[in-house]
Each structure stands twice: as C-alpha cells, then as structure tokens.
DNA sequence: GTTCTAGAAC
DNA sequence: GTTCTAGAAC
C-alpha cells in the first residue's frame, strides 16, 4: 500500500473497527477519526469522511478539498459540516485530556491543508503548541502556522459557502502555485511573532513559550484555589483546621504518540 | 515520510 | 570546525 492512498484505504473500510487501535481513535457512520502518524503537536488527529456516507459523491470527489469544492456545492457543504461537527466533539475530548494531563487547556486548531501530501480529504485537529518530536522542518511548521495563510481553518472554509459565489469560486481553486510558496516563508513564532533563523532555535523558543504558559496556568490555578480557600474560610463559622483542599491534580507523563500510518 | 550529503551559515 | 538546510534518491 502506497503512502499516497493510505487514508483512502481507511475511508473505504466497511468495518473501521478492524483498523488497529494505534491508527483508529473513533468512528461514526459518516467519519473516521485517526491519530496522525507524525503528530506535529501534543494532540494531533485527522478526521476523514467515509466514502459511502455522502453518495452520490464518489471517492474521487473526496480526494481533497479542491476536488470536493469543485463538485456539488450543497453536498460539499454537508461533508465539511459533518467533519466540523465531529471535530467539535473531538475538541471537547481533547480538552478533557488536556485538563487531566496538564491541569489546564489551550487552543485547538481545526483545518485543512490546501496542498495535502496524501489523497483523501482529511481535517487536521491539533492542539496549538507545535511541540512534538515529529515537528522537524520549515514545511511542517509553516503548514500549521495559523496566520500564515496555508492552513485553511474550517470556520473560514465554511464561511466561503455563504459568501459571494465569485469569492467561493476563487477560494475553491486552491492553486498549488498560490499556497506552496508560503511553506518557504520565514519561521515566525505563532504566539509572539518573533522571527527565527532555523528550526532548532524556533523549537527552543517554542519550548520557552510552552514553559511560560505552564507557569501562567500554575499561577492562575494557585490563585483560584487560594480564593476558594478564603471563600470557604469566610463562610465557615466552625473551624476544622487544614482540609488540604489545595492539592494540585496529578500530572501524567506525556505518552509517546502511536506509530504507523503517514501524514 | 526517511536518509544522505553538498554547501551555506555561523 | 560545526550546525543546519534543502534537494535528490528512495
């Protein structure tokens, strides 16, 4: 099986549950949610439309965003909306896991690559940190940098359907020549816009940004539990001494991502 | 996607 | 001299 069509082979499965658990996260009648094999953030999933769920759209219509938008507009909107609904549910699950593992939650990005490296439409759902051993090249980084213009946020894609038809048609072109050069743009921090000469310096900066976020959230948490204690103390007339209610939640070690599959 | 490597950047 | 990128080959 070639890498190019691997996702298509998943989307064609009549029984997705037969996929290995290292690949499949969950599925519905209409969609599959899989782990990105090379996660570029701490959390990184792909949501795929199943091929028989959107008839009369064919597997070819579902090759990528461009082929989908070129066809029946109503059906296309239905596909994107279905992926969006599934992504919204997934986002909530990720946020729960963020709180369990890290004690706080941070942003989650949901969108498409205009020039994807594998066939079959897939929606990226990833945490906004770009902190992962698989995040190795300028191309990787720029393909997810939110403000660059390469990553197509699903809310924006959905808005094209309600815009002037001329605008819809223009955006639907998704020309390689328009988007591919963006991947070669300067490396800029997605949080503070600082510029970096190469990937290693950017990565250490992202690590600093992450540590800052952790510290900020820790301080917030401490402040909240202090306030909570004070409110309780103020309310209680009978003193029971220290109830040790300020214990922080246990932090789990970040698990290594599952293997297999290609992004 | 990975590995290899020439040559640029430091 | 070492680090890093980017293109070719796979």
Image (spheres, coloured by chain):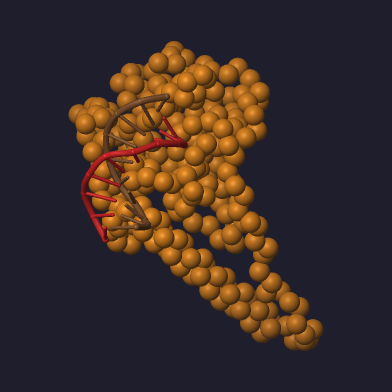
Chain colours: A orange, B red, C brown
Spot occupied by residue A188 in the image (x, y as percentages of width and height): 30, 55
In the image, A69 versus B7, the foreground residue is B7
Number of marks drawn: 0
Relative placement, left or right, of A263 versus C7 is right
Image side of residue A163 versus residue A241, left or right = left
The structure residue drawn at horizontal position 45% and vertical position 61%, both measured from the top left corner, is: A207
In percent of width and height, residue A191 lies at: 36, 59
Is residue A168 visible to the viewer in this orientation of the structure? no
Instruction: Please state the horizontal and vertical placement of residue A232, each as a whole percent of the image.
Output: 68, 79
**Residue in the picture at 62% in, 49% down:** A255
Residue A4, given in percent of the width and then of the height, sits at 43, 23
Residue A222 visible at all: yes
Residue placed at 63% from the left, 26% from the top? A19
Vertical order, A154 against A240 (above or below) = above
Q: Is residue A30 above or below residue A240?
A: above
User: Between residues A180 and A54, which one lies in front from this camera angle?
Assistant: A180
Q: Is A192 or A139 nearer to us in this picture? A: A139
Q: In this rendering, is residue A199 above or below A29?
A: below
Please tell me which residue is depicted at 44% across the width and 51% down the height of the picture. A130
Of A69 and C3, nearer the camera is: C3
Report which quarter residue B5 is drawn in: top left
């Amino acid at each position: 099986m070639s890498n190019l069509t691997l996702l298509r082979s998943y989307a064609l499965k009549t029984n997705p549950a037969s996929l290995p658990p290292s690949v499949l996260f969950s599925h519905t009648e209409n969609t599959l949610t899989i782990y990105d094999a090379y996660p570029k953030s701490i959390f990184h999933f792909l949501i795929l439309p199943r091929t028989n769920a959107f008839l009369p759209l064919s597997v070819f219509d579902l090759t990528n965003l461009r082929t989908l938008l070129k066809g029946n507009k109503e059906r296309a909107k239905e596909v994107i909306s279905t992926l969006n609904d599934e992504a919204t549910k997934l986002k909530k699950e990720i946020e729960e896991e963020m709180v369990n593992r890290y004690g706080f939650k941070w942003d989650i990005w949901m969108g498409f690559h205009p020039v994807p490296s594998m066939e079959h439409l897939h929606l990226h759902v990833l945490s906004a940190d770009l902190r992962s051993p698989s995040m190795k090249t300028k191309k990787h980084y720029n393909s997810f940098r939110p403000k660059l213009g390469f990553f197509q946020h699903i809310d924006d894609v959905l808005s094209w359907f309600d815009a002037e038809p001329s605008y819809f048609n223009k955006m639907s072109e998704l020309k390689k020549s328009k988007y591919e050069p963006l991947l070669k743009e300067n490396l800029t921090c997605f949080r503070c816009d600082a510029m970096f000469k190469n990937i290693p310096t950017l990565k250490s900066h992202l690590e600093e940004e992450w540590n800052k976020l952790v510290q900020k959230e820790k301080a917030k948490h401490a402040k909240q539990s202090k306030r909570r204690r004070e409110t309780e103390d103020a309310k209680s007339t009978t003193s029971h001494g220290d109830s040790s209610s300020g214990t922080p939640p246990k932090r789990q070690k970040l698990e290594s991502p599952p293997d297999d599959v290609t992004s």
